[in-house]
Image (cartoon, rainbow, N blue to C red):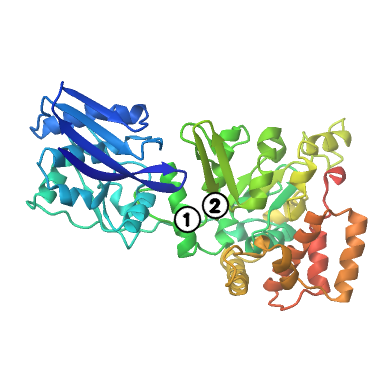
């Protein structure tokens, strides 16, 4: 007797449908699971047997075979427990076969039949909706999956709840979406004293998603500014929130099923490994660059990161996605992030302060900043020097604009870009524009062309640097509500490219 149940196998952020075929046939008593299961899936035999025993259901003394189809797709994770148990219950005619075949199930079983939360409920719900099936999952995972409106989600506390639901004794109520969470702390841009030029650059970075590096002495306010960047960025659109939450769901980073509309902010320590930044490890899990998708990746003390880690960022910055290749997995994750970096000008940090600089100045500055390769530095649209903050600024009362005031201008500039790229889904901000699209949106008059040509020659700009200046100038014009890029916009954009490693 064969019964079918359905679940999913995760390949990156994609949930692929898996058919769970359960057969109970005559033969020597055995319980085998085939179809490329990993160790956690193979151990489901003992968890399922104990969970069914807690319901006073003993497996018959026959040969039980569970096939996970397609057989050539690797199966990883403990979420296969629940579909295997439901398939066996259907094969034993405890619950209707037809009802089980109309659902997608995922969940880990405890030995007493309880359902333990698992990762990936949100992408699993999307897969179930595409297959026109309902989703069965642990109650703790249901609020996350319920955000998919097209999917009927049922959350259960234990296996007996599902048996009673399928037999019509006690129907489960549909799950409700988790409350939207707001992760931003009360960090206001007004708290940062002085550094007006850096604040202006921060506004431009937020408006056009331009990568930015801040170079300055210790205590100049680099980290303070970076941590206030999400507070001036627009909230995630519904599509962006879904994209970001799918990655967080696969990584197990969603809290209580709530989906946040605030931008992710990831700030890994400089001792982080390459796999933790790019992604990898067992199952090729998403790294920090993907967890920062649609948000901010802040790398403090940039030169202190290992050179091989920094060099792996070059391709994701350009393409907006990263492929994690392992012997048993090739997974592509999105990683369209805003890279914010901070660095001291030298090892001691006081190269620009003669009274405090070490004896190796100025050679120590060049050696230290050379840890950042030229190609990586070329990918920063905005380069800011941050001098020490004067004590008179620290003693002054709070001044300047609040995060809310700056955010209003950023949102207005983003709305201009949304309308501009409405017909091109590959572009969301000015930082994404390239080729013909960039030529159309960043057309310069004769005066602007002459200025940029002279600057490119004197500054030794690469083709990438040339185009990045055009993108920044376009964003500055958007903040100014200007249809065309004028000379002041271009001049300001050029001023943010003056800091180079040899000049620090």
Residue 40 percent coordinates (x, y): 34, 29
- Report the disc number at residue 493: none
The answer to whether marks 2 and 1 mark residues whose Cβ atoms lie closer than 8 Å is: yes
Q: Is residue 258 left or right of residue 192?
A: left
Q: Is residue 242 above or below residue 303?
A: below
Residue at image position (70%, 53%) is: 212
Residue topped by disc 1: 243
Residue 196's image quarter? Answer: bottom right
Q: Can residue 78 be seen in this view?
A: yes
Image quarter (top left, top right, bottom left or bottom right) of the C terminus: top right
Image quarter (top left, top right, bottom left or bottom right) of the N terminus: top left
Q: Is residue 129 left or right of residue 240?
A: left
- Report the disc number at residue 293: 2
Viewer-side residue, 4 vs 315: 4
Residue 214 percent coordinates (x, y): 72, 49
Residue 425's image quarter? Answer: bottom right
Q: Can residue 178 be seen in this view?
A: no
Neighbor class of circle 1 (other Cα within 10 Å; few <14, some 14-19, many 20+) is some
Residue at image position (56%, 36%) is: 325
Residue 389 percent coordinates (x, y): 74, 51
Q: Is mark 1 on a helix, strand or loop?
A: helix
Q: Which residue ends up furthest to the top in the rendered image?
A: 28
Mark 2 and mark 1 lie on one chain; the one further toward the N terminus is: 1
Residue at image position (13%, 27%) is: 26
Viewer-side residue, 343 vs 208: 208
Q: Is residue 484 above or below residue 463?
A: below
């Amino acid at each position: 007797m064969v019964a079918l149940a359905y679940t999913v196998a995760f390949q990156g952020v994609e949930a692929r449908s898996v058919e769970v075929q359960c057969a109970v046939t005559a033969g020597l008593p055995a319980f085998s699971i085939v179809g490329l299961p990993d160790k956690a899936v193979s151990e489901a035999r003992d968890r399922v047997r104990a969970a069914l025993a807690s319901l006073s259901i003993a497996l018959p003394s026959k040969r039980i075979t569970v096939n996970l189809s397609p057989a050539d797709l690797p199966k990883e994770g403990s979420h296969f427990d629940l579909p295997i148990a439901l398939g066996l219950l259907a094969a034993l005619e405890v619950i209707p076969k037809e009802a089980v075949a109309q659902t997608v199930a995922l969940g880990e079983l405890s030995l007493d039949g309880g359902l333990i939360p698992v990762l990936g409920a949100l992408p699993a719900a999307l897969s179930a909706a595409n297959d026109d099936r309902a989703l069965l999952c642990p109650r703790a995972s249901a609020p996350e999956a319920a955000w998919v409106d097209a999917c009927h989600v049922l959350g259960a506390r234990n296996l007996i709840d599902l048996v009673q639901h399928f037999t019509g004794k006690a129907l489960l109520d549909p799950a409700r979406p988790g409350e939207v969470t707001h992760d931003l702390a009360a960090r206001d841009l007004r708290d940062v004293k002085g550094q007006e030029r850096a604040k202006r650059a921060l506004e431009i970075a937020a408006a056009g998603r331009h990568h930015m590096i801040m170079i300055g002495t210790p205590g100049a306010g680099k980290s303070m500014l970076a941590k206030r960047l999400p507070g001036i960025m627009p909230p995630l659109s519904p599509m962006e929130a879904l994209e970001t939450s799918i990655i967080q769901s696969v990584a197990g980073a969603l809290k209580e099923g709530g989906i946040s509309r605030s931008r992710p902010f990831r700030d890994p320590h400089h001792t982080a490994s390459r796999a933790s930044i790019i992604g990898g490890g067992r199952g090729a899990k998403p790294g920090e660059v993907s967890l920062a998708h649609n948000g901010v990746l802040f790398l403090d003390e940039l030169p202190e990161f290992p050179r091989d880690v920094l060099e792996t960022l070059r391709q994701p910055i350009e393409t907006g996605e990263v492929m994690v290749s392992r012997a048993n997995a090739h997974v592509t994750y999105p990683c369209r992030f805003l890279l914010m970096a901070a660095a001291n000008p030298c090892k001691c940090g006081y190269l620009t302060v003669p009274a405090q600089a070490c004896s190796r100045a100025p050679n120590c500055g060049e050696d230290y900043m050379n840890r950042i390769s030229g190609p990586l530095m070329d990918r920063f649209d905005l380069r800011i020097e941050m001098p020490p903050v004067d004590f008179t600024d620290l003693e002054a009362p709070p001044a300047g604009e609040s995060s809310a005031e700056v955010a209003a201008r950023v949102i207005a500039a983003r709305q201009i870009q949304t309308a501009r790229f409405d017909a091109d889904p590959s572009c969301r901000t000015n930082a994404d524009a390239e080729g013909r699209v960039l030529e159309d949106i960043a057309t310069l008059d004769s005066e602007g062309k002459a200025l940029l040509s002279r600057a490119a020659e004197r500054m030794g700009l690469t083709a990438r640097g040339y185009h990045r200046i055009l993108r920044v100038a376009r964003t500055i014009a958007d903040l100014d509500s200007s249809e065309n890029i004028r000379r002041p916009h271009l001049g300001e954009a050029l001023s943010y490219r003056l800091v180079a490693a040899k000049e620090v």
